[in-house]
């Protein structure tokens, strides 16, 4: 191949790859900064600001990427790069819920604590059901039996770990 042909091939290759970023609506980028509902990303040697963390305005939740993580950005402006949205991320900093009707409960902790609470209620029920009043003591024996049975119940529920702190709402 002559040097002229080689130069022409290189020129065609350069022109054909010059607009790769405009050919596809999806681009891999690196998160440079997160600012509220948007982030700044870097791809193809350029920084794009204002990439929304949700594809739709006013979404119930958003996934906030870790700075430095790789994200998939959708160009919703047909190659103009004026309307960008992060649609996937390689690392999540946090998930934020905004008025959504979702739970942040840790189901395993909730199940465990509800079992402890159920055991306590069952103990109270059984104490009341099975204690026998004493004759002519004004209920002192009955009270003593109830207190004795209830004191045997040592488990107390602890709901402090039910909410998952990594999900904000």
Image: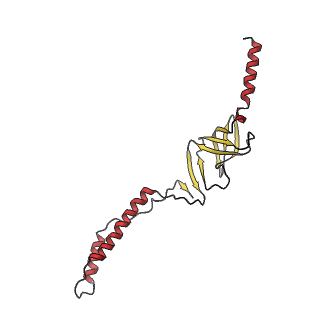
Among all residues in the image, which is located at the extreme left? 135
Q: Quadrant of the N terminus?
A: top right
Left of 47 or right of it: where is 137? left
How many numbered marks have been drawn onto this rendered protein structure? 0
Q: Is residue 69 above or below residue 154?
A: above
Q: Residue drawn 29% across and 80% down?
A: 143
Residue 3 position by quadrant: top right
Residue 117 position by quadrant: bottom left
Q: Residue 34 placed where, x, y %? A: 64, 47
Q: Residue 169 placed where, x, y %? A: 57, 58
Q: Residue 142 placed where, x, y %? A: 27, 80
Residue sitting nearer the eye, 100 or 156:
100
Q: Residue drawn 44% across and 63% down?
A: 159
* Coloration of the structure image: secondary structure
Q: Residue drawn 66% across and 38% down?
A: 27
Q: Residue 94 placed where, x, y %? A: 56, 50
Q: Residue drawn 74% across and 11% down?
A: 2
Left of 149 or right of it: where is 60? right
Residue sitting nearer the eye, 106 or 152:
106
Among all residues in the image, which is located at the extreme bottom? 136
Residue 73 position by quadrant: top right
């Amino acid at each position: 191949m002559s040097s002229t042909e080689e130069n022409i091939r290189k020129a065609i290759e350069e022109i054909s790859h010059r607009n790769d970023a405009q050919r596809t609506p999806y681009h891999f980028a690196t998160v440079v900064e997160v600012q509220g509902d948007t982030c700044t990303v870097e791809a193809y040697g350029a920084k794009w600001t204002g990439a929304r963390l949700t594809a739709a305005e006013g979404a119930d939740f958003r996934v906030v990427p870790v700075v430095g993580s790789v994200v998939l950005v959708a160009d919703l402006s047909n190659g103009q790069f004026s309307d960008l949205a992060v649609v996937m991320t390689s690392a999540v900093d946090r998930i934020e819920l905004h008025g959504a009707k979702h739970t942040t409960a840790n189901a395993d902790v909730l199940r465990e604590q509800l079992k402890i609470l159920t055991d306590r209620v069952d103990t109270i029920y059984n104490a009341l059901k099975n204690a026998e009043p004493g004759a002519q003591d004004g209920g002192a024996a009955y009270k003593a039996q109830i207190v004795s049975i209830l004191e045997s119940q040592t488990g107390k529920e602890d709901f402090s770990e039910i909410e998952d702190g990594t999900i904000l709402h």
